[in-house]
Image (cartoon, coloured by chain):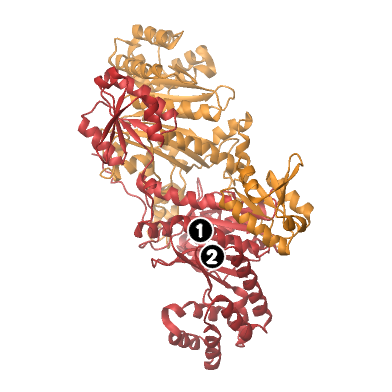
Chain colours: A red, B orange
Amino acid sequence: MGNQRPAIPKGTRDFLPAEMIRRKYIFKVIEETYQRFGFLPIETPAMELMSSLTGKYGDEGDKLLFRILNSGDYLSGADAQLLQSGDAQRLAPQISEKGLRYDLTVPFARFVVQHRYEISFPFRRYQIQPVWRADRPQKGRYREFFQCDGDVIGSDSLLNEAELVQIIDGVFTQLGIRVSIRLNNRKVLAGIAEAIGRPDRLGTITIGLDKLDKIGEEGVRGELQDRGLSLAEVTSLLEICRVQGDTASRLEQLEKSIGSTASGARGLEELRTLFGYLGDSPLNNAIEADLTLARGLDYYTGTIIEVVALDHSLGSLCGGGRYDDLTGIFGLPGVSGVGISFGADRIYDVMDALHLFPAAAAGHTRLLFLNFGGAEERESLRWLRQVRDAGIPAEIYPDPAKLKKQMAHADALGIPYVAILGEAERASGRITLKQMASGEQHAFVLEALIQHLSA
Amino acid sequence: MGNQRPAIPKGTRDFLPAEMIRRKYIFKVIEETYQRFGFLPIETPAMELMSSLTGKYGDEGDKLLFRILNSGDYLSGADAQLLQSGDAQRLAPQISEKGLRYDLTVPFARFVVQHRYEISFPFRRYQIQPVWRADRPQKGRYREFFQCDGDVIGSDSLLNEAELVQIIDGVFTQLGIRVSIRLNNRKVLAGIAEAIGRPDRLGTITIGLDKLDKIGEEGVRGELQDRGLSLAEVTSLLEICRVQGDTASRLEQLEKSIGSTASGARGLEELRTLFGYLGDSPLNNAIEADLTLARGLDYYTGTIIEVVALDHSLGSLCGGGRYDDLTGIFGLPGVSGVGISFGADRIYDVMDALHLFPAAAAGHTRLLFLNFGGAEERESLRWLRQVRDAGIPAEIYPDPAKLKKQMAHADALGIPYVAILGEAERASGRITLKQMASGEQHAFVLEALIQHLSA
């Protein structure tokens, strides 16, 4: 025995075949939906220059970046005093110039600026790749996980938002997950802040609103006062947000309270246009205007989108929004974009919990030829070749092992049929096909076999 | 303007849509072929523990590993004296416990041992993921590139080798690349070393043979003598390797020269069995026994496989072999396996150079609706929805921009049709479909349009 116990870094995962096949099913649904809407695939490197990554995700995000040690004598460029001081944080930039991507949004912004003369705008891209974060691992949170992003950049038409919502609706409908699609607009939030006389405290206000679900009105009231809003301001805020009824009626109530502010009026107009587009083309899932939705406020400037599962409490399965200046940080200001990101890992967990994976996502191989060795093996190989050439995934057990062992293998892999080509079958020119689930057996000539398995 | 110029780490690449679609085509052919042969997908994390990676690729390989800096105060565990000494190599293990995977073989060995009770053996897996090496970037060599591995582990049947060769033949046939599939056996090489009386110098001998193509017999003669073989030994070696004719005749000649050695006899028997399997099921590409083939001698113990393009000189497009103790390093000895690895990036370059990509690999979107704004836009959206629901990838220009600009966009994206739904069309209930290449226009009702585009 060797002395090395196999293990992987904490927070990362191996994917076994059964899980892989299900994951691929999710990616396929998302990818085909993006394609049906005219989105084009891109990929960016796992490693980005640290200068592209730092400062984009806030101080907390910077700490979660995985840094790559420079190759070769990485200490040669390091300041000797700094080395001795033991100041890891200040030393890091001198010994590591690259890092693993933290999300797909910043690399996409970098990509758009870098390739702006090779791209035709408006540019619709999708990107399905892993990202890495040095988060504390916990249930449902990993250090390597996949994002499935779709963005339209170079167009400020709200039609793009409408199409992204349709993509969301299409993906979750096809996966069988019932969701609520929640929409808000950063300008509406700004309008609310303005209407209560505190446009300077937009951040505080939205963080407070975000907690309404969790801690209730009283909790929010207390928190916002702790953070320096007056009782009158908080009361006025909660009054505005206490809108009820369907979307049309909510927007009407808001019109009265914030329609006189510049931001509020524009935000409401945008929401109305978006709901207008969506109303023309009925969705399978519910959409609603949700004033408490504030995610990613740092760079969203218009529409905000969030999707939650109705039958499972696992937080957001997809989210996104409009950003007016994402590429500005890389030297290309004034380009508006809007995007969404599906969290494949959470979607997997929800589908698993709700038993939503179709049986077809269990395996590929349809048929295992039992191996009887000798001339029967050679004859089996001829049949196998024909079956595969007809596009049917099939295999042969590689050794003439005990039949019980071979059958157990088919069982373990969930292969639905085994083919028996022994001496008798070889003489008759037919093989015996056994259905594993029922135990039923039938003899087939080659063409009939292929037809049967293709059905 | 921002002050940050967008760039990516040297040796890495962004993939734009046109390239992505072609790459996906290659991956799809490889993946579907693996699946047709009963191989199952797995994935492993990008990061492995350094203890899993170091010592597996030789000293040179160890230097090419990308290391991840530990999170948080990575200096806290570092030896103070070592820090001051500036010894980067010895310090590295103390500040970085993880690294990026260097290939898919070692992670697979680790995977098999770690999950051995969850796997049914023989285990056939495929794995298509990027790997990272801190190589000096040059034309055709990248620091991030994709490998497409297939292995069968837990079976020493040569049927597995035969199936891997069939997979290789199937993949390159479908891609349209004419290749030569070269086979050798490590035991034959050992037999040759034994036959000339130098079993102790197998490494030197195979490295020499490997260069026959490049530097010729005289070159090899000189090099081997420089490395301590006698003139008689070298003459005898070159004599043995000067086999001619077809495979059967080559094996026969070898039988005479090395058949009396234990390794040689077994190696020849294995090659004969393998060629026997392959002869039963004709391949599209040539296979040949090649005694000079010595790749990856470090861990291969039986069959050695290498594939080169016939119409392009870009080295090996695929390679592999049998290893009898890959999992031993992780504590599970005595498990035999055999595998191959397709180099997707080189395959791409060859296909590109030989213009082998099919036109279908150019893009997804079939139809762009021009945007006339207002009521026409809304009517277009209704049509668009129906077209997409029929599974046809389509999009609408998001703004009622100048038609010339919209048409140029369709052109830039290679979208074959545009749909015109202006006032006249709206009144008539038909849209005008324009084929971009010919300029031809025809009016269609919805059903006819869908039928036309599905054809």
Q: Chain of mark 2?
A: A
Q: Residue at x 40, y 31 (%)?
A: A451
Q: Residue at x 46, y 37 (%)?
A: B31
Q: Quadrant of the C terminus of chain B?
A: top right
Q: Residue at x 20, y 29 (%)?
A: A402
**Residue closest to the eye, A226 or A17:** A17
Location of residue A273 in the rendering, given as x and y in whole percent from the top left corner: 65, 70
Location of residue B41 in the rendering, given as x and y in whole percent from the top left corner: 40, 42
Secondary structure beneath label 2: loop
Mark yes or no: residue B46 visible.
no
* Mark 2 neighbour class, 10 Å CA radius: few under 14, some 14 to 19, many 20 or more: some
Res A315 → quadrant: bottom left
Q: Chain of mark 1?
A: A
Res A415 → quadrant: top left
**Residue closest to the eye, B232 or A96:** A96
Looking at the image, residue B137 lies above or below residue A286: above
Which of pointers 2 and 1 lies earlier in the amino acid sequence? 2
Q: Which mark is residue A57?
A: 2
Mark yes or no: residue B174 visible.
yes
Secondary structure beneath label 1: loop
Q: Which mark is residue A428?
A: none
Hey, what amino acid is under mark 1? Tyr
Q: Which mark is residue A102?
A: 1
Looking at the image, residue B217 lies above or below residue B369: above
Q: Are marks 2 and 1 in contact (CB under 8 Å)?
A: yes
